[in-house]
Image (cartoon, grey):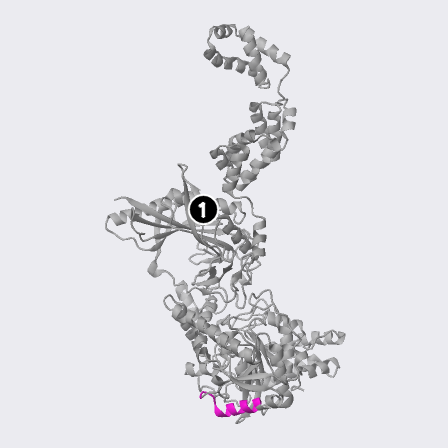
Amino acid sequence: MHWETVIGLEIHAQLATRSKIFSGASTAFGAEPNTQACGVDLGLPGVLPVLNREAVVMAIRFAAAIGAQLQRRSIFARKNYFYPDLPKGYQISQFELPIVGNGSVEIMLADGEQRQIGVTRAHLEEDAGKSLHEDFHGLTGIDLNRAGTPLLEIVSEPDMRSASEAVAYARKIHQIVRYIGICDGNMQEGSFRVDANVSVRPQGEGLGTRAELKNINSFRFLERAINFEAERQIDLLESGGKVVQETRLYDPDRDETRSMRSKEEANDYRYFPDPDLLPVELDDAFVAAALAAMPELPDPRRARFSEEYALTQSEALQLTASRELADYYEALVREAGDARLAVNWVTGELAAALNRSGIEVTQSPISAERLGGLLRRISDSTISGKIAKQVFESMWGGSDSAEEIIESQGLRQITDADAIEGIVAHVVEANLQQVEAYRQADQNRRAKMLGFFVGQVMKLSKGKANPQQVNELLRKKLTQ
Amino acid sequence: MYSKSISELGAGLRAGEYSSIELTRLFLDRIGRYDGELNCFITLASAQAMAAAENADRLIRHGDAGPLAGIPIAHKDIFCTDGLRTSCGSKMLDSFIAPYDATVVSRLNAAGAVMLGKTNMDEFAMGSSNETSYYGAVRNPWDLNLVPGGSSGGSAAAVAARLCVAATGTDTGGSIRQPAALCGITGLKPTYGRVSRYGMIAFASSLDQGGVLTRSAADAAVMLQAMAGFDPRDSTSARESVPDYSAHLDAALAGLKIGLPKEYFDQGLDPEVARSIELAVTEYRQLGAEVMEISLPNSGLAVATYYVVAPAECSSNLSRFDGVRFGYRCDQPRDLEDLYKRSRGEGFGAEVKRRILIGTYALSAGYYDAYYLKAQQIRQLISEDFKKAFEKVDVIMGPTSPSTAFALGEKAGDPVTMYLSDIYTIAANLAGLPGISIPVRPVAGRPVGLQIIGNYFQEAQLLNIAHRFQQESDWHLALPTGY
């Protein structure tokens, strides 16, 4: 039988607001436990929530980014359950009327095929605190710093049919939320969390029973967790068993999913509208103000890059992968004035150096302005591309400009025809046998043999001779 | 002296006839003398009160003191007070000291009022007799065998016995108006949103409203003035501007249209109480008001609706009392579930548990539509009844409670009978309307309250109507024997 995997994702994106969604406490990560939790976050008797307007602005931006219906009236509801790191005994979330309605995103698969993935809804809610089970000798420690941190929960349609599609979708959402500046996307710190609903069915039949996978904190684990789970369900069904609806935890160390709780053990959340908060009513002016600072989105930016900078599809895709990289590229083009040279350097030397150091473009020791200075020196033939790589290495390790390094290391290209001619003459003298062979050879052979002479000249000039002039002079000299 | 109004006392303080320190000591002495039998206070704040009085005296001497400066008041123990225990009448919060002041408390502090202490109440404001308090029942100063009403029973009895000049209260289904009626004082529940709920421990968030218990409408006007207004910490507080409540007290009532809902005068009402209400209405006729019968057709559904909505909200609001961060925690919990079960089982009293159970049930999957959603729909109908009524009349009058104060223990074993004592007050909470109860002719020595319900944010009008009656009558001046 041919099995089909059906996947829907629930993504929790932590919104990059300075303060919490219903209190004025800071949202900064990594503070001492319980130092960033005020009375509201602690759920003290008598306190009341007040909605953070910035969180609403961010949700509006997200709605626009995925072409979703923005609900002009949305309602906060209480999701009731007991847990030690849930101070009020309920989480304030949105249930029946979420702020973001139906939308969709386009993903590109490995074979270049595009697919539309539906987003059912996205709603605002507060995060819970953290339960710390280590270091407390059989007891549990509670850290409420995270309690009340704003989240946007983004729920997809069950539109994905493979783990790689799910990863492509998750990456797309990740890219969008970072582009529009509403989430830092840090999966290790839990700023971007993905839960996967996975079921399998014989091709063409109705939906199977699903399992919800939790505790996935990287795209790699997302792929592995889904693949493991789909195989587990298929094995189970093929051996005559039944899939039960349950929540399963992904264990990256063992690369497997384990049952956490079944549907029967699931809480009845007793949702009802939170009487402490008024319905969120959005008027045109508020929405317009929220969208005023909306940056260009990845897809349109990619299309514009292809057009404006004459890039290939894959170059445009690579350069617009993150807003920061795209911004870097555009700044570099402005500085260097040569879009082609800029793409070669960003996807070549710069990408390799960043990769070697394991850092992001925002942490690059060479700013777009400095790199632009280097590229200008290539364009005006002050140095060759090869020397430029040497200058780049020096720039990476220090703070000097390209200009300063070229001068202090004496790397300026030799363009004086007499000087180059002298070197060429010297090389011809020293390699008479090869010169003879060259002269006997046909055009094809000659083209290949020329490289040897060029290499010799460059070696003698310490790479500084202008390659174009070297080529011309050698050709002339060798055929004389 | 202890029966003087706020404006009289304020004038005396400003004239230097006596100091706030003397006044505060006078009331603290009265509390010392009478509270043993009445049990109005859960926590006294004698030292803080004397310090506040000293401070008020300084302000008064400098001439920059408002009308409440130096006036000794009490807060219902549902309002959080920084550094002073806030128990909410529950074992659960017997050791809870809030690290902040409720907005009502900070505003009254800023006005210079002197807080004497925190008054007794039904546990988490759930009760109509003040018998569910962990700190024991409050007794009615008119007859120690009677209940004072609830849940603001401590505040009502304290004001009636002159243990403080005025007190704050909260009203979720009648908890200010009903005890005011049973203790023969004035009780005002403002429009929902008029007074900030920040720092007021929540029972049913969509119904709870802070208000005042005073000896007269004029005193209530001064108190409300200090408490009312938008609070950025309470999203449900109203941005509506606050009028000068004292300025409108004397306005003439000629042409005022009063509606008497026929549903408020049917067989459930004690005939003698009905007679007292009729006499009061006659007084209003003589003041120039026009009286007409109206109908609030869905009134009969109010109690049932309330006992779905209020428990539903309370079941969620009281979830935070879990023994984890504050409040009562059971001894030696075996595990998490044991911690929850025993902390809550031992920390909450029977009535609170009953309402949590009812509310949890009403919100459960499969019952939500039949109970909670249906109740919300009926709530809407009840609001519309009032809306229609206010197209015809300016205010609605009727009894505050179907009977006078009942005996301690009389209804304690029968929750439904107890719930029915709020039959006339609950609708105003469901609709969010302001209501006031003022004392009228007593029955057999027991106080009777006239309830006046106004349109949204018409507190000034209610106070005016109540005040004009109090100009013509002296029921509000009556002092229980022995105090």
Q: Nearer the viewer, residue A285 or A271?
A: A285
Q: Chain of mark 1?
A: A
Q: Position of residue B370 (x, y in %)?
A: 38, 70
Position above or below: A330 against B438: above
Q: How many marks?
A: 1
What secondary structure is marked by label 1? Answer: strand
Residue kind at label 1, given as amino acid type: Val
Q: Position of residue A327 (x, y in %)?
A: 56, 39
**Residue B271 within the magenta-colored segment of the rendering:** yes
The residue indicated by pointer 1 is: A105
Q: Which residues are magenta?
A: B267-281
Q: Quadrant of the N terminus of chain B?
A: bottom right
Residue placed furthest toward the left: A240
Q: Nearer the viewer, residue A54 or B480?
A: A54
Left-right relation of A436 to B241: left
Position above or below: B213 against B85: below
Residue at the image point whose x is 54% and y is 33% from the top: A309
Dominant secondary structure of the residues highlighted in magenta in the image = helix
**Residue B77 within the magenta-colored segment of the rendering:** no
Q: Position of residue A55 (x, y in %)?
A: 54, 55
